[in-house]
Image: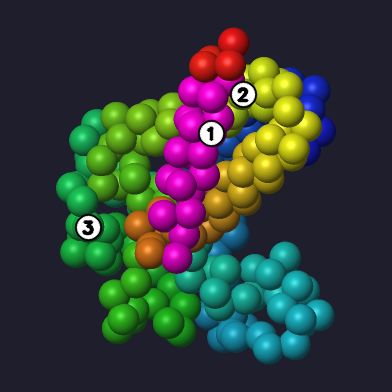
């Protein structure tokens, strides 16, 4: 991503990611292809050795990964049921069980701790519908495009260095939001919005000096 920002390629990368996501989801939905990736209940367990974990992940036998998929499948079914405005904030946990597919069930699917869907983008879609997802993607993508512009408009090399650091921080969080619910946690959310505020601050400084 450093080189993406350096060579002003953010728009192309974001568009490519969007197209890849749409095609991937379309492939999985068509003719129920996603059902072919259901895990083996007896073999999907927790792995503690790193090598075993990597192998189990790509073989769809890691319980953490496949429990996520179990909830993601439910999330997609919920989105199909109420696509425009979703089920409302915090309501995934209240409704998802009736939308699950039993072939994806794992040993931890009882979910006694009441944890969420483990994907911020999908959680937003479930809770706020396609409308909410569009706003979220516009904010995420717009921030990166905005940050790229600020990076190239900043003449001070020291300032450019920390702006790049801020941008890469945002990218890391954006990427991990695919498999986690991060923005609403006190350890990640404030950092994300602080990084965004730093971009705005630098933009104002650039305009003042200009």
Disc 3 to disc 2: CB gap under 8 Å: no
Give 82 or 112, whichever is nearer the viewer. 112
Upstream in the sequence, badge 1 or badge 3?
3
**Residue 10 as seen in the image, left or right of residue 87:** right
Residue at image x 20%, y 57%? 91
The answer to whether residue 201 is magenta is yes
What is the secondary structure assignment of the residue under circle 3?
loop
Span shown in magenta: 187-206
Quadrant of the image occupied by residue 167: top right
Give the crowd class for mark 3: few <14, some 14-19, many >=20 residues within 10 Å: some
Residue annotated with mark 2: 150
Q: From the viewer's perspective, is residue 168 above or below residue 180?
A: above
Q: From the viewer's perspective, is residue 96 above or below residue 17?
A: below
The kind of secondary structure the magenta stretch mainly shows is: helix
Q: Which mark is residue 199?
A: 1
**Residue 101 as seen in the image, left or right of residue 11:** left
Residue at image x 81%, y 80%? 51
Q: In front of the other: label 1 or label 3?
A: 1
Upstream in the sequence, badge 1 or badge 2?
2
Upstream in the sequence, badge 3 or badge 2?
3
Residue annotated with mark 3: 90
What is the secondary structure assignment of the residue under circle 2?
helix
Give 53 or 78, whichever is nearer the viewer. 53
Separation of residues labelled 1 and 2 (CA atoms): 7 Å
**Residue 58 as seen in the image, left or right of residue 118:** right
Question: Colour scheme of this structure image?
Answer: rainbow
**Residue 162 as seen in the image, left or right of residue 25:** right
Work out which quarter of the rendered image holds the N terminus and state it.
top right
């Amino acid at each position: 991503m450093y080189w993406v920002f350096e060579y002003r390629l953010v728009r192309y990368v974001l568009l490519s990611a969007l197209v890849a996501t749409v095609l991937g989801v379309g492939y999985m939905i068509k003719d129920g292809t996603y059902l072919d990736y259901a895990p083996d209940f007896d073999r999907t367990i927790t792995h503690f050795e790193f090598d075993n974990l990597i192998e189990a992940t790509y073989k769809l036998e890691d319980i953490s990964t496949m429990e996520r998929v179990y909830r993601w499948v439910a999330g997609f079914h919920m989105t199909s049921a109420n696509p425009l405005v979703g089920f409302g904030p915090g309501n995934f946990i209240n409704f998802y069980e009736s939308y699950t597919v039993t072939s994806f069930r794992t040993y931890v699917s009882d979910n006694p701790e009441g944890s969420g869907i483990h994907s911020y983008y999908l959680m937003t879609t479930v809770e706020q519908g396609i409308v909410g997802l569009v706003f979220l993607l516009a904010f995420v993508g717009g921030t990166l495009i905005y940050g790229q512009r600020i990076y190239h408009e900043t003449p001070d090399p020291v300032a450019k260095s920390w702006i790049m650091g801020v941008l890469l921080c945002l990218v890391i969080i954006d990427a991990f939001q695919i498999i986690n619910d991060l923005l609403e946690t006190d350890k990640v959310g404030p950092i994300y919005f602080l990084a965004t505020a730093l971009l705005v601050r630098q933009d104002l400084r650039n305009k003042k000096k200009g």
